[in-house]
Amino acid sequence: MSSARLKIFWLCLLAFPAIVFAGDFDLPELPEAKNAPAKDTQITPEPAKAFKPIAEPAAKPAPAGDAKDATNDASKDAPKDAPAKNMHKDAPKDAPEQSDYDGPVNFAPIEATNVSDAHSAGANLPAGIIAKKIPANLNRPLQVGVFTGVKELLWKSHDATYKFTAEGNKVIASGPGKPQPDSKYQINTDGACIALAPSQKELASSCYPGSFTLTAKGGLLTAVNTVDVEEYLRGVVPYEIGKLDSSRFSALESQAIAARTYAYKHFGSRESMGFDVYADTKDQVYKGLASATPLTDSAVKATAGIVMTYNGEFIIAYYHSTCGGMSETLATWGRPDLPYLKSKPDLRPDGTPWCNESSYSKWERNFSEKELPALFKKNGKEANAKVPEFKHVKAIGVKDTLASGRILTLEVTTDKGKFTVAGDKVRWLFKKNGTMLPSSFFRVKHHKQEWKIEGKGFGHGVGMCQMGVRARSAAGQDFATILTHYYPGITLERFEK
C-alpha cells in the first residue's frame, strides 16, 4: 500500500468507525470439503490510536412467543432438511425449518477425541458423558456465510446507516464519512450485536454476535460472521426446532447438541468458500439473536460443549421435521449406510408415531393429467431424471422402496417411453410453484382425470425426527435418551476450553 493510499485509509477509518480494511480476497467458485480449519486470509493493518469501534446496545432477545420465525409462526415455518437449496413456501405451522435438499456435503472426517488426556469429569454432567479438552484445531470461532452472493447490504451503526454494494471485486460503502472502496471490510462492535441485513425491514430486527467480514466477487457481496460456536447456537436452536415451553426443554437441549455436532463436523468443510457453514438450510438456519429466548439460551448453556461422536469422530448429525413413524438411511441419497443412521421405527408404546402431532404426519397432493407433462419436463433436470419429450403420462408406479417404505425408484410411463427417478429426488419431480413434495414416503393413485399422491412425513427422514423429539421430551425423556434413540451407538462427550 502506498504512503498516499495509507494516509487516505486512516482518514477514512477515523470517519468510518467499526469498519476495517483487510486486504484482497477472492472467493473460489466451488466449495471443496476440507478437514483442516480455513486459513486466515485477512490482512489487518495496525489500528490507529484514535480508532475505537462504536459499541451499540445489544438488542434484547425476543420474549417467548414473540419470535417472527419460530415454529408456531405459520407464515415462516418449514421443517428442517439440512442441508439444502431453496426454502419451501408452504411451511407447516408445527414444524421447524425445512427446504430442498441436494445430498450430503462431502468432507473428510474430523476426529473429535484426539486429545492428550481426558479432562476432569466435570460437575453436573449427565451419567456417561465425559468431559475432554477441546482439540486445538477446533478451539477457534466458527465462520458462517450469512449472506452470500447478494447485491447489497445495510449496516446500522449507532444512529448511522451504511449501504454496501459491489463493483467487480470491490466493496462500495456509502454513508457518513464517505468511506473509500476496498476489497474487504470488517465490522466489529466490541461485543455488542451487529445489525446487518439486505433490506430495511430485516435490518430492524437484525442482531448478530461476533464480527463480520464483507468481500465482493463478480459484483456480488458475501458477508461472513466470525462467531463463537456457543453464541452461534443461540441463533440456531430457535429456528431449527422452534419456540417450545419448559415442558419440552430436553427437546431444545437435543437440538442444541445436534446443531453443535453438525457445526464442529463441518469445520473447514467449505474452506474454498471462505467459511465453514452457510446460515440457511444448505447447512443450519442461523439468524442471529433476534429470536433467542431465555429458554433457548438456557438449553445451549445447559449443554455447553456437548457433542455426539462415533468411534472417535463427530457423527454427521442429520435431522428433519417429521419421519412419519419410520426413519431412513443414507440410501435415500444413494450413499453408503452409517451405523448410527439407521432405518428404525419411531413409535410410542401404543404403536402410534411419536411425530403424529405434526400436520405432516399424513398429507395429500393432487395433480391434473394436463399439468404433469409440463411439470415433469420442467423439473426433470433438478430431479436427476432423463425426461423425454412427451404429451401424456400413462402410468406412475413405485418400482422399489427403501427399508422405511420410502421410494427408492419411481417409474413414469409416457407416450414416448419410460423414465425413472431415484430416492429423495422424487420430491423434486412434482415441484410446483417452487414447492416440492414434503417427503418421498408416498404412493400414487390415478382417478379419472387426476393423479393423487398420499404420503406421510416431512423431510428426508434421516437421523433425528424433530417432531418426534418434541413429543418424547413432553413425555419426560432426557436428551441422552432422545439422542441415543435417533443416533444409536453414539457417545456423548463434552469439550472444555
Image (cartoon, rainbow, N blue to C red):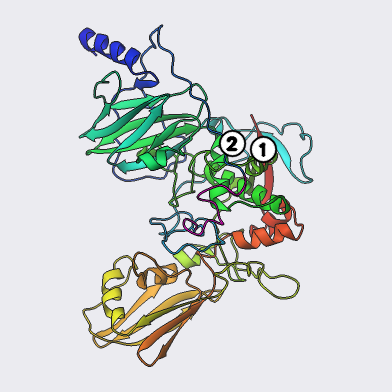
Query: How many numbered badges does the structure rendering display?
Result: 2
User: Is label 1 in contact with label 2 (beta carbons under 8 Å)?
Assistant: yes
Q: Is residue 488 above or below residue 444?
A: above
Residue at 73 percent across and 40 percent down: it is 130
Q: In the figure, is residue 207 to the left or right of 341?
A: left
Q: Quadrant of the C terminus?
A: top right
Which of 64/249 is in front?
64
Residue at 67 percent across and 40 percent down: it is 298
> Mark 1 = which residue?
301
- Image quarter for residue 53? top left
Q: Which residues are magenta?
A: 64-77
Q: Quadrant of the N terminus?
A: top left
Q: Which mark is residue 230?
A: 2
Which of 55/19 is in front?
55
* Kind of residue at badge 1: Lys
**CA–CA distance in space, label 1 to label 2:** 8 Å
Q: Is residue 188 above or below residue 100?
A: above
The percent coordinates of residue 58 (x first, y second) are 53, 29
Q: How many C-alpha atoms fall within 10 Å of the one at disc 2: few (<14), some, or many (≥20)?
A: some
Q: In the figure, is residue 232 to the left or right of 100?
A: right
- Image quarter for residue 264? top right
Q: In the figure, is residue 237 to the left or right of 266?
A: right
Q: Is residue 389 visible?
A: yes
Q: Is residue 339 visible?
A: no
Q: How many C-alpha atoms fall within 10 Å of the one at disc 1: few (<14), some, or many (≥20)?
A: some
The percent coordinates of residue 328 (x first, y second) are 56, 67
The percent coordinates of residue 405 (x first, y second) are 54, 76
